[in-house]
């Protein structure tokens, strides 16, 4: 099973949807005082959304992306203790991350 130590050892893989219009990628946290990365959904136009809310963990990333599923409508991910699914529409309905 996954442990916190496991998360600290590996950078999450980058995944692409089947048509390569969306990508899952861990990017550095906005708050540079907290080490690690946050998983983002990125489209080909460069728009970015956080997949999960920011957390205060010391992990490289609090979750690992597993796959796009259901015709690229759902993101499957895992933490140290659970498997989860997040609809892509709900991620894109959240606030877009900007460089400002």
Image (cartoon, rainbow, N blue to C red):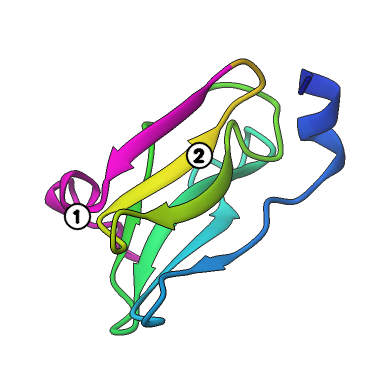
Q: Secondary structure at mark 1?
A: helix
Residue 15 % position (x, y): 55, 65
Identify the residue at horizontal 70%, vertical 26% (top origin): 58
The stretch of residues the image draws in magenta is 82-100
- Earlier in the chain: of badge 1 and badge 2, it is 2
Q: Is residue 78 above or below residue 69?
A: above
Say if the magenta span includes residue 88: yes
Residue 92: numbered disc: 1
Q: Which residue is mark 2?
A: 77
Identify the residue at horizontal 68%, vertical 51% (top origin): 12
Residue 89 is left or right of residue 58, and the answer is left
Corner quadrant of residue 52: top left
Location of the C terminus by quadrant is: bottom left
Instruction: Single out the mark in the foreground, 1 or 2.
Output: 2
Identify the residue at horizontal 25%, vertical 52% (top origin): 88
Residue 5 % position (x, y): 85, 24
Most foreground residue, 68 or 10: 68
Q: Is residue 18 above or below residue 87?
A: below
State how far apart marks 1 and 2 are (Cα).
Answer: 16 Å
Residue 75 visible somewhere in the drawing: yes
Corner quadrant of residue 1: top right
Most foreground residue, 95 or 82: 82
Identify the residue at horizontal 87%, vertical 39% (top origin): 9
Residue 52: numbered disc: none
Q: Secondary structure at mark 2?
A: strand
Q: Residues within 10 Å of mark 1 (few under 14, many from 20)?
A: some
Residue 27 % position (x, y): 56, 57
Residue 58 is left or right of residue 69, and the answer is right
């Amino acid at each position: 099973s996954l442990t916190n130590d496991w998360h600290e050892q590996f950078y999450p893989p980058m995944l692409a949807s089947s048509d390569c219009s969306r990508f899952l990628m861990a990017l550095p946290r906005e708050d540079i005082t907290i080490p690690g990365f946050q998983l983002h959904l990125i489209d080909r136009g460069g728009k970015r959304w956080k997949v999960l809310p920011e957390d205060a963990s010391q992990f490289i990333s609090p979750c690992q992306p597993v796959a796009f599923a259901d015709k690229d409508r759902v993101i499957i991910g895992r933490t140290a203790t659970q498997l989860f699914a997040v609809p892509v529409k709900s991620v894109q309905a959240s606030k877009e991350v900007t460089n400002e």
